[in-house]
Image (tube, rainbow, N blue to C red):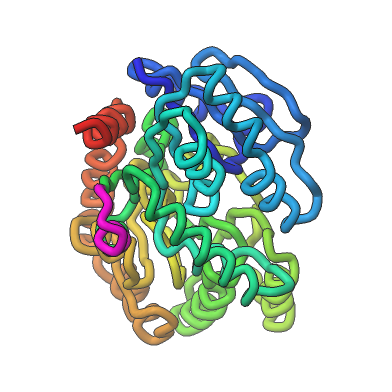
Amino acid sequence: MNNLLFFGTTNYGINLSESDKLKFKELSTKFNIFVITYGEKKVYIKHDDVAIQYFKKPKILLLQYIYFYLLNYNFVKNFCNDNKVAIISCKDPIAAFIPVLIKKFSKYEIKLIIEQHGDYLNLLLNQRKFRSNLLIKILSKIISNFTYKNCDLIRGVEHTYTNSVAKKYNKKFITFPAWVDYSIFTKRDSERKNLLFVGNIIPRKGVLFLIRQFHEFSKNSNYKEKLLIVGDEQNPSYAMECKKYILENDIKNVEFLGRKDSFELAKLYSSSKLLLMASSFEGLPRVLIESGLCGMPSLATDIQGINEPFGSDGGTLLYELNNHNEFKNKLKMFFQEDNIQKDLGKKALDLSVKLAGKNSFVENWEEAVNILYE
């Protein structure tokens, strides 16, 4: 079996979730799995199906990136050598910087994959707040250009953008979704009520837009059920702006639930009528696959990563980004026609099963490795 290293600041935690355990268990049937990531302290732990090297996470955001992505060359090189790593999969093009240096300037031979979750630079600058976005943008472009030129394969979650990047750098590519726990996210027979948003509370996700339009829709149609908002408040000032609007307009049917684990999310997906999204940038949203596995349809922006495959192949009503009239008209149509609700729910389920069925993740990784060595 190939020794495969996942390199990037994915938050697995010292104690793995049941979902992460299942993911690594599936992958371990075909690979020996290693991970280098951040944790609460620097420690190396051999879990049942994966060995993880955790680095202690600095408190300052910029130092997190510099320390992990730029200053660990010798450690990562020695780790790969000691564990006979054959393939490194990097979370993004910035994470690939040290692996590319190892590939180019050491005697150690590796195959290098860069994961492509949509327009990375726009995602980064719209989700993270830096003091100098211009400097971060310039450095990110320089590093990304360097790493893309020297990788062996691009692994995307969405075809159109991944294809354009692969063509630009003349690289092989493959697309398949991120891991989704098909054992937790499953359709339950329960009464459905309320609307649902799941995601980080940040401007890119358009949470304030959803609150405003839902409030207007509720007033005009006398809709009494709630909009439930689930997710981390990663941008405190934006979260405060959302809550201020709710307070100033005396809105009673919008509720912030905070972060929920996978089991709680699955219950919410199976007991809510419709998932709402207002994102301006996405890769291939895992939330649409998770909700689809629970038979839950969605109303989302007509943007790259959502319109294909969700809008075309199942489960999602689309509206133009920031078009409040179209949003409310689609929402009204959803509630007026029972057949639409049933049809969308079935299509969402069928598509999500196709994208994230049992063993599909490891089978996709096998195909990626075959492409690497063909």
Q: Residue furthest right?
A: 59
Residue at image point 70% right, 74% down: 132
Indicate left or right for 311 with 230 as reference: left
Give the total of numbered labels.
0
Quadrant into which the C terminus falls: top left
Q: Position of residue 199 (x, y in %)?
A: 54, 56
Residue at image point 60% right, 32% down: 76
Which of the two residues, 107 or 271, is positioned nearer the viewer here?
107
Does residue 146 appear in this view? yes
Quadrant into which the N terminus falls: top left
Q: Which residues are magenta?
A: 164-172
Q: Position of residue 124 (x, y in %)?
A: 56, 63
Q: Quadrant of residue 363?
A: top left
Indicate left or right for 310 with 120 as reference: left
In the displayed structure, 185 sits above or below 232; it is above
Residue at image point 32% right, 27% down: 362
Residue at image point 37% right, 67% down: 300
Provide the major secondary structure of the magenta segment: helix
Which of the two residues, 273 or 161, is positioned nearer the viewer here?
161
Q: Position of residue 163 (x, y in %)?
A: 25, 59
Q: Quadrant of residue 12?
A: top right
